[in-house]
Image (cartoon, rainbow, N blue to C red):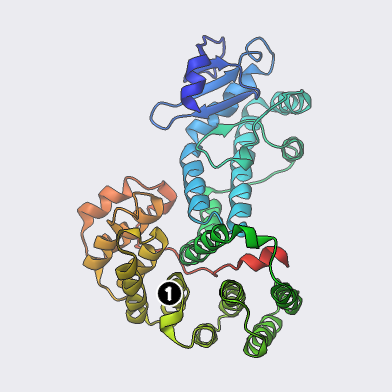
Amino acid sequence: MVKQLNKEAHDCSVNSQRANYQVKTVNLGTPGITTGILKPVIWLDQTLVSRSELDSVLLHEATHIKQRDIYWIWFICLTENLFWWNPICMLLGAKARQQLELSCDERCFNQLNQRYQHDLASLTLEAFTGAPKGSSYCSPVLNMAHTKHFNVLRVKMLNKEKVMKKRHIVMMLAAVSFTTIAAAQIVEKKTSTNNESQSAQYETSESYNTQMAELLNLAKNAKSEDAAELKKIANTIVAWHEQRPVLSQVEEKQMKLLSLTLVNHLLHKVGDHQGALSAYELWYKDGNNAPQYTRNIKADTLLKLGQPQLAEQEIEALKADLGQNVNQGSLMVLARAYIDQAKYEQALATLSHPNVGDNTVTNVYKRYVYLKQNDIENANKIKAKLPAQLATEQPWIFDYGIPNSPLLKQI
């Protein structure tokens, strides 16, 4: 996108005290955006240069740069990419982006007062057709235009006192961080299975459709916050699974996987990890016939039961089967199993696997290990790569999360 912008852009000399960064104009379709980390560039729509709102737009984008919001956008994008299948993470990512905008608006309003509010309202009402919706893209770009509804909210919020600390954004995203990586394997394999039987997606048997309807009916209250209700639903699904007729090979595999992810989600949510392990062993009585990717479900549960050595065995077996095709999520679970056993050298070796990649989550893990090893030099090298809010003095690591189920979208 930036390359395309550069092809069409013109350097701009604007008469504004806010333009302390390189400014370029282009046929943008939105008032302004900011790109770049080391050398940030403010991009303006070419129609804005002669408008009265120019100063407010420049101040807005410059404030994003000063607040280092671009780093937060990268962090949000990374989290969304890791947990792309998780609707909760997508929702939190959108909320975090909105909070960055509200924080920026507040600082701009403190400098320009009612003028900024007036300019924001003017831009909201103006027909900037084709404006990109910042909350809909997972790209490291900051822009002033969002959905019409949210822009109206921004104007209204300037009349209210609010404080949104960056740490809140971290907490929102970290809430869905660790164990959801493991469950990502399930969704990936599910997608693969669906692609292999694409023609059957819309022609499932009557028996399969009947069982799916029964399962969804049993789980209709699965989004309740009542622990007793959730436990009851999980137990009911377990009993239903035990007595339901066996389907054809492909449909049976699909039904078992989907129903297990739902039971797993419910029991993890109420903290019944032993029950979740028992359900897995009931679904796959002979461990040898369990799909490879379900080892992540079992390993995740074993970690929460305080049995990292068994979790290690599960993922090592999966790793041996998959070879170089082992997924990042599985490797992160394996690294956590090593960390929980204080096997720090093995953890570092796993985190250095080429399929893991160099990213914020990996660096948080590496720094934690280095601090546990009292390797301050390497810990500080990693610390320099992290956002300030993640580079705490005391070693810390992402908490376990609650695994998701694709069926929750249908309830």
Q: Is residue 142 left or right of residue 52?
A: left
Q: Label 1: few (<14), some or many (≥20) within 10 Å?
A: many
Residue 162 location (% of width, % of height): 67, 46
Residue 355 location (% of width, % of height): 34, 54
Query: Residue at label 1?
Result: 295
Q: Is residue 165 left or right of residue 335?
A: right
Residue at (45, 80) in percent of width and height: 289
Q: Is residue 20 visible?
A: no
The front one of 172 and 338 is 338
Which quadrant of the structure image shows residue 138?
top right
Placement of 361 over or under 45, stated as above or below: below
Give the structural element (helix, strand or loop) at label 1: helix
Residue 103 location (% of width, % of height): 60, 40
The front one of 390 and 333 is 333
Q: Residue furthest right?
A: 125
Residue 42 location (% of width, % of height): 52, 23
Q: Amino acid at mark 1?
A: Arg
Placement of 286 over or under 20, stated as above or below: below
Residue at (32, 50) in percent of width and height: 383
Q: Is residue 188 left or right of residue 365?
A: right
Placement of 124 over or under 218, stated as above or below: above
Total numbered labels:
1
- Looking at the rendered image, the quarter that the C terminus falls into is bottom right
Q: Is residue 168 visible?
A: yes
